[in-house]
Image (cartoon, coloured by chain):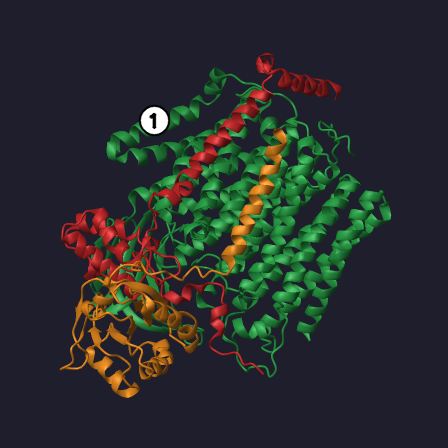
Chain colours: A orange, B red, C green
Amino acid sequence: MKRILFILPVVGFAVLLGVFFAGLGRDPRALPSAFVGKPLPAFQAPPVREGDAGLSNTDFQRGEPVLLNVFASWCGPCRVEHPVLMRLRAQGVAIHGLDWKEDAAAGAKWLVDNGDPYIRVGSDPTGRTGIEFGVAGVPETFVIDRHGKVRYRHVGAVTSDVWETKLRPLMEELRSEP
Amino acid sequence: MRRVLPLAPAFALLALLLLASPAAAVNPDEQLPDPAQEARAVELSRELRCVVCQNQSIDDSDAALARDLRIILRERIAAGDTDKQAIDHIVARYGSFVQLRPPVRGDTLALWFGPLGVLVLGGVGAYLYIRSRTPAAAAALTAAEEAEAAELLKTDKAD
Amino acid sequence: MSAEVGQFALILALLLALVQSVAPLVGAWRRDGVLMAVGRQAALLQGGFVLLAFGCLAYAYVTCDFSTALVARHSHTTQPLAYRFAATWGSHEGSMLLWVLILAVYGAGVAFFGGTLRETLQARVLGVQGLVGVAFLAFLIFTSNPFLRLDPAPIEGTELNPLLQDPGLVLHPPLLYLGYVGFSVAFCFAVAALMEGRVDAAWARWVRPWVLAAWAPLTAGITLGSAWAYYELGWGGWWFWDPVENASLMPWLLGTALLHSALVLERRGALASWTVLLAILTFSLSLVGTFLVRSGILTSVHAFAVDPERGVFILGIIALTTGASLALYAWRAPSIRAGALFQPLSREGGVTLNNLFLTALTATVFLGTFSPVFIEMLNGDKISVGPPYYNRTFAPLAVPLLALVVFGPMLNWKRDEVRKVVQRLRIPLGVAGIVLLAAALFGGLKGLATAGGLAMSAWLIVGSFAVLGRRWWAGRAYLARSVATTPRSVWGLVLSHAGLGMLTLGITGVTSWESDKVLNMRPGETVEFAGRVLTLQSLEMAQGPNYEARRGILIVRGPGPDYSLRSERRFYPSAQSQTTEAGIRVGFLGNLYVSVGEESEQGVIVRLWHHPLIVWIWIGGFVMSIGGLVSLSDRRLRVGAAVKARTILQPAAAE
């Protein structure tokens, strides 16, 4: 009986070691979205270009899975992912955009200079619209299913690799869902 | 050959740099006119973690998003939210990660009650240990313990 | 040249560490005096070569040898000399070299001062130390080589992070490492004792000075780190419960428990297997701390560059050292016999309680630090644990421990009586009672926590001196002689416990009465704050050696003569970063803390804090550390003092 007491430390340590090993690969800063499995909250963002329709949460309830890309012209990694988004658009992937924390004019100029990969683009000069669904920075890309529910959030630039390994498989899966 | 480029600061000891200038962050224009409400806002913002910083509360961080959240928190308080409602408003958007005081729930039981558990278990252990070391109590011990105690006494004399 | 010499010295040190681990262990097993002597020589030589390697790196830094990659990453010709030198340990590789240096120096110390140690015990301690050395030297050479060259060498290096260019960097890491690497000696003693199957009073007497030699600098290092964060981070906090701070606090808490339990083992032969376990766990927590800082498993404000590969290596080292020692413990510890008997109310009983609370406090910090990892493993959820958690868990456990501190040294060994103890402590009890009443009358019910804190501080400070009072009262017939013959270890105890009281006073003061204000000011404007009148006298640009600054000068009129405070917002062009230098008026009663922030439409944002009594937190910490050193200088404890202790615990029959 008493012997067990002396074995306890080494057993406890073994468990701990296992947890540490398993924990090594994880990124402590990667945050899952609080909205995974939930619909986007109601919002109505004005357009970046006068005359456009802007973006609202109802745009995500059209029966097709779609990407929501949050971007800004002042953001470095957005420059990296933009060509990838352009290519996806050319392949027919549905993407909506939200221009975060800048004047609509800056967003409009960005789209003129670099091309427009979005079906609809909303402007969010104060950042409040993005904050409503937990945007912490740019770029962030949400995968929204056909019922308007958030299924995944990717933080950082969408590279070809991210698209191939994470977003595309998920989009295909969502397309085959009822 | 590889050149040393501006990437190098990433190797620096403190990664605090990400925050550029760490100074307590509340600006005069953010503050609520009612001192009682402002005090509540400060208390609450010390319980909320800045999601884009390394490890700071939104009260301490001068990241832009932390400022936004401080302002939102103050709007909620000014609108009459209770402390819990105001915190929940932020948690609903950014998840329980932002609570520097983790909620008490199934998976955090060990966290919240572990310290007490260690104290109680350790206390029982210490009690048993002290009792086994108490000379006067030897008579009241079990036979096995008594034998052990007797042996110990013998060792003591042997010295 | 220096990088190659350093590299060569490191490799030789690794080979010597191999010799140091094999020769004495085999020697002790076969009772071969020559092999054991080889172990001692290897330990001394290894210390010399690591010192040489360290000297080479420091030389490269000081002379701005940018062909050494590490130097080019953390040094710049405009960086002041002191920070070029201190930058030696400002990076992961350099600080690991410091780590290994301190390990080797402690090993050499055991070889050098261990003359009166039982020869086989010394040999085994050195052997285990050698094994730890092999692991860390291999880690350094194979994953974190500080001596890699750059070709072509850049003309200019990248500046050390400006936040680190501070006197704090010169002292804080060496002190901290002296502390937690120092616990390796106690660890090696524990493993050696388990190998020998012999844990006795003599063992405790040998190990205690080494524990003190680690504890005192660790205490100073933590205190210094707290002060550094206070003035450098620019918002006047003194403890943040950050994972990296916790990494140093955990070995400190458990090391403190070890210090006390080893005393009981030395005097009474009790708590033997527990003390051995504490020695193993204390150093293991130091290793876990090293892992935590360098693996990126948790986010911290002060983490090193993250590299999972290094994390795996360190985890492997932990698995081997801690795992093997705990397995050895499970096998051998049951045969360690318990020592002398004692009544619950006795010095032994007091130390048992002390250990109970310190262990619970360590567990609290451990749970708080690692729960996010555990819970994510469990259900994938991310949680955060911050100061509000520790305020609710750590503080309630710390308060009863503080109350118990004064009793400990006033209790007799073996048995004591409540009535007598209370009588012995009537003066501190009276003082604490008066303080409590006065503060409660003054502050009312709302201020009860404050009153309690003040009473606790008085209890600790006055109560710590009760030990001296009792001693001198007993020898009052020859007072001068009893004062003169008071052992240094008693003085050390009094200082450390009184320091804890000062720390309590500081914490009580700043948490009870802290006030702050933030406002926009233009030059010439005036504000009233904390009983003072502050005027922003000027706002100007200034040029430092390697930075540009916007400097605000405030004139403070208040109680006492006028003075001025200067706060700067510095921009370091070559590091492309900004820091805020607060203007701080330090006083025993309270600090005035001013930081001039960003420009706004109405002038600049000025932040003001008043931190009553806060300086006592650091005075207390340093007094505790000095107490440790005074105790270490005690003749009876001096390393190598001839000891003919009785053997209470016989080896198991297996030997």
Q: Nearer the viewer, residue C483 or C221?
A: C221
Q: Position of residue C146 (x, y in %)?
A: 61, 68
Q: Residue at x 60, y 42 (%)?
A: A10
Above or below, comparing residue C616 to residue A6 in the picture? below
Q: Nearer the viewer, residue C41 or C451?
A: C41
Quadrant in the picture for residue C115: top right
Above or below, comparing residue B156 to residue C20 in the picture? above
Furthest residue toward bottom: A113
Task: Decide if residue C213 is on the left or right side of residue C304.
Answer: right
Above or below, comparing residue C601 to residue C123 in the picture? below
Above or below, comparing residue C509 to residue C472 in the picture? below
Q: Residue at x 28, y 54 (%)?
A: B91
Quadrant in the picture for residue A64: bottom left
Q: Position of residue B11 (x, y in %)?
A: 50, 68
Q: Which residue type carries mark 1? A: Ile
Q: Chain of mark 1?
A: C
Task: Decide if residue B34 is on the left or right side of residue C490.
Answer: left
Q: How many marks do you count on the picture?
A: 1
Q: Nearer the viewer, residue C589 or C447?
A: C447
Q: Badge 1 is on which residue? A: C434
